[in-house]
Image (cartoon, rainbow, N blue to C red):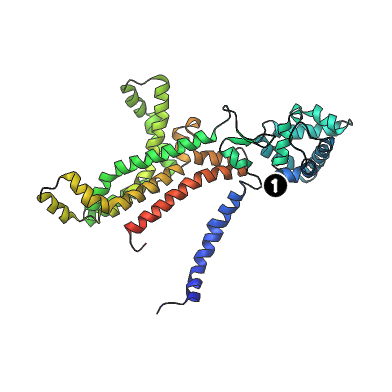
Amino acid sequence: MRPGLPGTLLRLAPLVIAVLVGVAAPLGLFLWRAVAEREVAVALPRTAVALRDWNGSGLPEDAAFEALANDLRNARWRDEASGGGRLARAGTRLEAEVPGLRAALPLTAQRIAETQIPPDAAVLLAAPIWERPEAWAAIRRTSDGISFSRLLAALDLRRAPEGQVVAVPAEIALHRAVTARSLGLAALVALAALAAGAPLAWVIAAAERRWATPLLGLVLLAALAGAGLRGASWWALLHRDGVLDDALMGLGLTGAPLDLLRTRWAVVLGALHGALPLAVLPMALALRRVDRPLLRMAAALGAPPWHRARRLVLPVVWPGLALGAALAFAGALGDAVVPALLGGPREAMLAGLVSQVAGRLGDPGLAAALSLLLLLPLAAAVLLGLRAARRLVPSA
């Protein structure tokens, strides 16, 4: 007898609660940081109000200078009294908009406390950056509660003081290049995993059960070893022992081309080590569904190998290929350890950039915006994998 709707909901409740509490809530709160603006409004509330009617052309009115002086004086006093870091958090947020504002906030607060001259003169004398309209525009933009400036920054774009979207200077543009390199690397690793894993998957699928199980165990061992161990082992093999250098120099490569290929292919090989098991297992499962007696019968009747592969093998195994490619792509795209170990700063990938921005730079909002660039292709890979899994396992 089938359970009713209340019974089904009751059985699903623990799973739904676990997903909401363990995945959806923390991920949603983190991604909310990509558009939420709190740091500047908390530290400079009067300045935010004074800049609401400013049109962004030229410097704001004297009231904005007075409000900034009062806010900095109060924020400095509160930070000293409570040990808080309002000015530091606001400075970190504003630094992402206009370089130099992180140092300007505490310096201006200190100069204002030491002088008795009018606020507008005190602010301008404290730091030259206050003579630039973009500094005031950054304060107004980041104190509205919600803004898309971090999302623009993740795409190497920003808003000018007048409001139009412009590209950041080429010398500081980084995020789009890292994103393109990460997607290209993940796609290359996925294709390499399919090519290198197909023969192994065929052997596993054709082997008897007593041999297939140990082979699957060896494949899983690579996946369970951990990214740190894989990266360290490849670093010792390729860099310290010089195996990759010897191979590339044997092709006549020296200088800059050698350095580029050394790091790029080291990263590809290290990422492939982790992605290969993810591609082999679905392909092996799909290949077990191939009708081998039918293949032998087609060969006996004179069907050429390509005709047999196209008509009898590919229609059966393509869900495994698609699922393997999706898993390998997602694994390579989300790997932050192996590229950092084998490639160094020049080969920084998107996942590593997210952790670096959130940790060393202390800007979780920009890290959340960059995470969206990471999550969108991952979500596409997951959807492709789920669709392939339904074809691979009809009951899924």
Q: Residue furthest bottom?
A: 1
* Above or below, comparing residue 38 to residue 59 in the picture: below
Where residue 365 sits: x, y (%)? 62, 44
Determine the image quadrant of residue 286.
Answer: bottom left
Q: Is residue 51 left or right of residue 322?
A: right
- Please tell me how crowded label 1 is: few (under 14), some (14-19), or many (20+) other residues with Cα within 10 Å: some
Q: Is residue 163 left or right of residue 17?
A: right
Kindly identify which residue carries mark 1.
38
Where residue 259 sits: x, y (%)? 42, 25
Q: Is residue 359 visible?
A: no
- Front position in the image: 114 or 396: 396
Q: Amino acid at mark 1?
A: Arg
Residue positioned 31% across, 22% down in the render = 250
Where residue 349 sits: x, y (%)? 48, 37
- Front position in the image: 138 or 199: 138
Determine the image quadrant of residue 155.
Answer: top right
Where residue 183 sits: x, y (%)? 44, 39
* Above or below, comparing residue 171 to residue 315 in the picture: above
- At mark 1, the secondary structure is loop
Position of the C terminus by quadrant: bottom left
Q: Is residue 9 left or right of residue 329?
A: right
Residue positioned 75% across, 37% down in the render = 55
Q: Residue furthest right?
A: 116
Position of the N terminus by quadrant: bottom left
Q: Is residue 137 visible?
A: yes
Residue positioned 36% across, 51% down in the render = 323
- Counting every numbered tag in the picture gives 1
